[in-house]
Image (cartoon, rainbow, N blue to C red):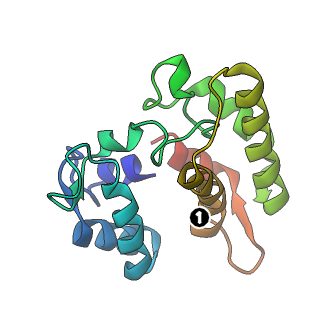
Amino acid sequence: MLNALANQGFLPRNGQNIDENTTAKALDTALNIPPEFGKLLHKAAVRTNPTGNVTNSFNLDHLARHNILEHDASLSRQDAAFGDNIAFNDTVFNETRSNWQETIDVQQVAKARLARVNTSNTTNPNFGFTKIGEQFSVGESAAYLIVLGNKTTRTANRTVVEYLFGK
């Protein structure tokens, strides 16, 4: 999702030195995520910076560091054990979206996540979750329904969700 925000100019297009205010403003402006929650997400992202919390910033490529926030069973990226865990992966995403109908509801979100966890668990000999990785896995599943969906019906339009994942 953050790559899409950088591609659209809400975050620095080069993905470098993203500070707390930039993160909070981008998430608020683009996705209507309250700034306080955006700052909390930024704090988690800073953990991925290999230099530590010296600059209180992160680069988008830092987020790919395995078993910090990045985790096995991503909805759109292959597991780090198989190579590139940064680039969008059509095969992985096709499995995710095979569980969706035109209107995505919470049951389909859960089914898609469970399918990815099961696939990773059976194909990745190094499969596992850190505590924070598991939390982010659950959070990313909920996020696309909450952020892109209808708050009343608790559903999201599949086309919109697919568009954002593909960016």
Secondary structure beneath label 1: helix
Residue 106 drawn at (x, y percent): 79, 62
Q: Is residue 130 above or below residue 153?
A: above
| Residue hosting label 1 | 148
The answer to which of 158 and 40 lies nearer the viewer is 40
Q: Is residue 13 above or below residue 33?
A: above
Residue 37: quadrant of the picture: bottom left
- Would you say 114 lies left or right of 79 here? right
Image point (64%, 36%), residue name = 128
- Would you say 83 lies left or right of 148 here? left
Residue 116 drawn at (x, y percent): 72, 36
* Label 1 crowd bin: few (<14), some (14–19), many (20+), radius 10 Å: some
Q: Is residue 92 above or below residue 34?
A: above
Image point (40%, 49%), residue name = 4
Residue 147 drawn at (x, y percent): 57, 67
Question: Is residue 64 visible in this depiction of the protein?
Answer: yes
Residue 134 drawn at (x, y percent): 62, 51
The answer to which of 14 and 157 lies nearer the viewer is 14
Residue 23: quadrant of the picture: bottom left
The answer to which of 1 and 73 lies nearer the viewer is 73
Q: Quadrant of the C terminus?
A: top left
Q: Is residue 135 above or below residue 67?
A: below
Question: Is residue 160 visible in this depiction of the protein?
Answer: no
Q: How many marks?
A: 1
Hey, which residue is sitting farthest left in the picture?
A: 55
- Would you say 82 lies left or right of 29 here? right
Image point (64%, 49%), residue name = 159
The residue type indicated by label 1 comes to Leu
